[in-house]
Image (spheres, rainbow, N blue to C red):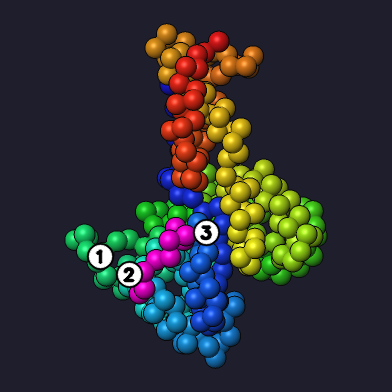
Amino acid sequence: MSTISAARTAVRRALLYVPGSSQKMLDKSRGLTADCVAYDLEDSVTSNRKAEARSNIRKFLEQSRADGIKECAVRINAVGTGNEADDIEAVCNAPYLDTIVIPKVNSSSDLKWAADFINHKRTFTGHEESVPRQIKILALIESAKAISNLREICQTANSQLDGLIFAAEDFALDLSLTRTPSLTEFLYARSAIATACRAHDLPSTIDLVCTSYKGDEGRRAMEEECLGGKGLGFNGKQCIHPDQVAIAQKAFAPSEDEVTWAVRVVIADAKADKQGRGAWTLDGKMIDAPVVGKAESLVSKAGACGFDVSAVKEKWKGQKPE
């Protein structure tokens, strides 16, 4: 019944940066449970340790994937820095690399160069692959120019581009803004990014970093920012400390009540469809195609987030449309 299309399936509720220059932090990351860990070659690595970080990350991604990490990414240095080619060459054929995060994507040409270079250098094939598996790309949006070029950026490397990430601190620097707790100074940029991702069917729209992470105050700030970002259309958040990961993954996952509602809608809608009913009622509220589309999307995401959807469906298998 639903005609609402869903974005390509990907779950990146939390994207945690881990500095590639710290072997200790690389090793500790193996014990994490996170949708995405981005091993960093950019901001957290000083210029005199870039080569060391490349070597560390390459060796790390040649080892088996940690059970709790769904996706291994690497954030390279920006196009034009003189480091980007060495970064890509160092990691693009690592067996357990899934995604490359490209910072400071200001135009489609930045993204096109990176995608072309990745594809040119990518030769690794796994045991069951006849051709190299394509590496996904996440683009960091960090400037006014990037916001102005969102449409062109989203239309570039479309088969590889898997989402956008908002970098608030660099954006604030570009526009001479002062970050405030309300984050209202970023409202336009954040809304533009979330809308562009959805318009171009990109699975991930990842929100700004919460710079407060210590103690109860840090937890509250993180929770509030996650809920605010979710309300704008973001479906994930950047993390700079492991303690932030669980908060983000809970905030950007459907709640138990939401999953129950969605399953009831999907089950009842199948019965309504057989009865030829295009619109019907559940708990006194009208259900039509857009509502069913939302429910189907929630059920799909719930499964990807680890919910036992089958058990919920079994419990509500008798649900009927009112």
Residue on which disc 2 sits: 95
Residue on which disc 3 sits: 34
Residue 130 vs residue 17: left or right?
A: left
Name the quadrant containing residue 160. bottom left
Mark 3: which secondary structure? strand
Disc 2 to disc 1, C-alpha distance: 7 Å
Amino acid residing under circle 2: Pro
Q: Are marks 2 and 1 in contact (CB under 8 Å)?
A: yes
Residue on which disc 1 sits: 126
Residue placed furthest toward the left: 130
Mark 2: which secondary structure? loop
Disc on res. 18: none
- Magenta span: 62-70
Give coordinates of residue 185: x percent, y percent: 76, 56
Residue 314 vs residue 135: left or right?
A: right
Give coordinates of residue 174: x percent, y percent: 69, 68
Give coordinates of residue 140: x percent, y percent: 55, 63
The residue closer to the viewer here, 171 or 69, is 69
| Label 2, residues with CA under 10 Å away: few <14, some 14-19, many ≥20 | some
